[in-house]
Image: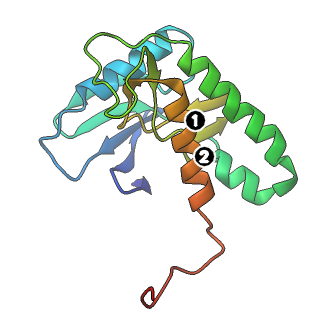
Amino acid sequence: PLLAAGRDAAVHDAGDGRVLRRTPSADRDLRVEAEVMERVRARGYPVPAVFRVGPGEVVLERIEGPTMLEAIEAKVWTVDRHARTLADLHTRLHALVAPDHLRPHPVLPGPAIVHQDLHPGNVLLSPAGPVVIDWTNARAGDPDVDVAITWLLMAAFDHDQPPPTGSLP
């Protein structure tokens, strides 16, 4: 069964505490993404375990719990606590040195692993703590670029507003 779908992939229940994440392109190589996840997990960073990688798909540990975004929407008064958790996740990730084979960020390359999409919608709040998902855009970069991208994504996203219509003057 389909559990979730986004711009980049659909996530299906694979049974036995696992999910199958499938991309629209069946021949897309997800090995680098899986390698980054395994690397950060081996260093204590909270990501799902990777069980198998194939063309256009990866089998991952199933993480139970709402996204941080869902938790904030349900209890808006918890936004400060979640903001501190998100900042801590950035700090912990940016302390990890990127492997030599990881593609550099196109604007601000640097020594750290940067997620480039680390926002409340990509943090699952499991009973054991927060877990970061969606490593599609991971690169070697300057930590400041990662934080700036998160800020831009969060500042530009206003889910209470209807999409714009018409044309600009």
Measured along the vertical axis of the image, is residue 26 above or below residue 48? below
Front residue of 99 and 146? 146
Task: Note whether residue 7 is visible.
Answer: yes
Q: Amino acid at mark 2?
A: Trp
Q: Rate crowding at label 2 as few (under 14), some (14 to 19) or many (20 or more) other CA atoms within 10 Å.
A: some
Residue appearing at x 60%, y 46% in the figure: 151
Q: Quadrant of residue 168?
A: bottom left
Front residue of 58 and 101? 101
Q: Amino acid at mark 1?
A: Val
Question: Relative to residue 114, is residue 25 drawn left or right?
Answer: left
Q: The N terminus is located in which quarter?
A: bottom left
Question: Relative to residue 95, is residue 109 drawn left or right?
Answer: left
What is the x, y in percent for residue 93?
55, 20
Tally of numbered discs: 2
Q: Rate crowding at label 1 as few (under 14), some (14 to 19) or many (20 or more) other CA atoms within 10 Å.
A: many
What is the x, y in percent for residue 17?
48, 33
What is the x, y in percent for residue 67?
62, 47
Task: Note whether residue 63 is visible.
Answer: no
What is the x, y in percent for residue 100?
29, 10
Residue appearing at x 45%, y 10% in the figure: 97
Question: Relative to residue 140, is residue 156 drawn left or right?
Answer: right
Q: Give the residue pinned by disc 1.
A: 147
Which element is circle 1 on? helix
Q: Give the residue pinned by disc 2.
A: 151
Mark 1 vs 2: CB contact within 8 A:
yes
